[in-house]
Image: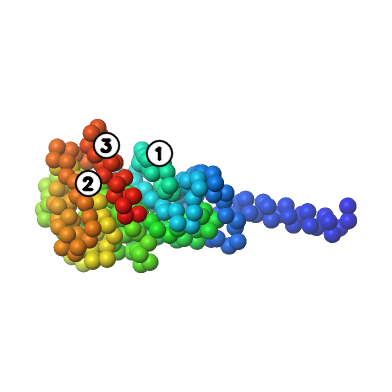
């Protein structure tokens, strides 16, 4: 074997290893995936922290117009995992198979790491990653959010306050906090609730801070269509978190839908869950 051929083989081998080992942080000439088949990839890294990963589910026969639904788990900003959103992921894949699904983890807050703006920054990083890899995955930059509890709060907050390119076409809040200036929060006597609020810095007396982290105070006339679900017996999310949000959206003429299940708490099953998923499906298919 001559030296030139040997060098060529070595270079090709190095290139192959490098390509397989590198993270796809941008779309620099990477060939598009086969669009005729569905594609799944788990624990895609979008940052240096172990918690900065997401799962990607791409439908078969997708095009450059394929839209993406981002799932954001709850857990009081300090716990939870993307596996908590498995039922939603399976529902979307089964009932709305033309959409791509991104199920994210984000850095969890602790005594040394405040959830804000850390978790909002993580959502931004995920969306930037998707945008940089649109051609590789064959997806559009049109997005929808489905969040639960703290994940719903983050979904609303990012959609209203940080979507500078107007990529979000719809957002869903299931039992998400919306307004930290609500007297039901500021004057509460619920020890468990207050611990949750303290995690997010709601013991902070700065009105500016409370408004900055409240989706309610970020609503504008250009906010994306929003669908809200709340439980009337929720010990963590007062009814006013849903009703005042509904009224704020109404006052700005933002397309919205609001459902209150009077006898439900911080989540539900059975017929009410069926009602939630059916309404969510229609809303996604209408606006995303």
Which of the two discs, 3 and 1, labels the residue nearer the N terminus?
Answer: 1
Find disc 2 in the rendering and name its residue. Answer: 229
Point out residue 164 in the picture as x, y percentages from the top left corner: 35, 67
> Judging from the image, what secondary structure is the residue with disc 2 in?
strand
Q: Residue furthest right?
A: 2
Quadrant location of residue 158?
Answer: bottom left
The quadrant in which the C terminus is found is bottom left
Task: Report which quarter residue 166 is drawn in.
Answer: bottom left
Residue under the point 60% across and 57% down? 30
Left or right placement of residue 50 versus residue 15 in this view: left
Q: Residue at x 17, y 44 (%)?
A: 260
Is residue 189 placed above or below 273 in the rendered structure? below
Disc 3 secondary structure class: helix
Residue at point 24% right, 32% down? 270
Where residue 130 appears, as percent x and y from the top left, is 46, 57
Q: Nearer the viewer, residue 264 or 195?
A: 264
- Asked which colour scheme the image uses, the reply is rainbow
**Residue closer to the observer: 78 or 163:** 163
Q: According to the image, label 1 marks what residue? A: 94
- Tag in front: 2 or 3: 3
CA neighbours of label 1 inside 10 A, class few (<14), some (14 to 19), many (20+) = few
Instruction: Label 1, secondary structure: give it.
Output: helix
In the rendered image, which residue does mark 3 sit on? Answer: 274
N-term-proximal mark, 2 vs 3: 2
Q: How far is the residue under mark 2 from the one under mark 3?
A: 12 Å
Above or below, 271 relative to 131: above
**Residue 216 sits above or below residue 102 on the image:** below
């Amino acid at each position: 074997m001559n030296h030139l051929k040997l060098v060529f083989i070595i270079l090709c081998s190095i290139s192959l290893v490098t390509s397989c080992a590198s993270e796809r942080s941008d779309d620099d000439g990477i060939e598009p995936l086969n669009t005729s088949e569905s594609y799944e990839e788990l624990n895609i890294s979008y940052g240096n922290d172990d918690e900065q990963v997401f799962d990607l589910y791409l439908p078969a026969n997708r095009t450059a117009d394929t839209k993406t639904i981002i799932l954001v788990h709850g857990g009081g900003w300090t716990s939870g995992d993307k596996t908590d959103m498995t039922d939603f992921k399976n529902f979307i894949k089964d009932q709305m198979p033309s959409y791509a699904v991104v199920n994210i983890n984000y850095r969890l807050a602790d005594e040394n790491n405040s959830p804000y703006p850390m978790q909002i920054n993580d959502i931004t990083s995920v969306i930037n990653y998707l945008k940089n890899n649109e051609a590789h995955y064959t997806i559009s930059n049109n997005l929808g959010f489905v969040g639960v509890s703290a994940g719903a709060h983050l979904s609303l907050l990012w959609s209203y306050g940080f979507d500078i390119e107007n990529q979000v076409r719809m957002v869903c809040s299931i039992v998400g906090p919306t307004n930290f200036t609500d007297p039901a929060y500021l004057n509460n006597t619920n020890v468990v609730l207050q611990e949750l609020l303290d995690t997010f810095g709601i013991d902070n007396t700065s009105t500016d801070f409370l408004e900055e982290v409240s989706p309610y105070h970020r609503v504008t006339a250009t906010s994306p269509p929003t669908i809200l679900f709340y439980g009337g017996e929720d010990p963590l999310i007062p009814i006013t978190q849903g009703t005042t949000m509904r009224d704020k959206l109404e006052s700005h003429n933002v397309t919205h839908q609001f459902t209150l299940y009077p006898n439900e708490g911080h989540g539900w099953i059975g017929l009410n869950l069926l009602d939630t998923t059916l309404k969510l499906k229609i809303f996604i298919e209408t606006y995303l």
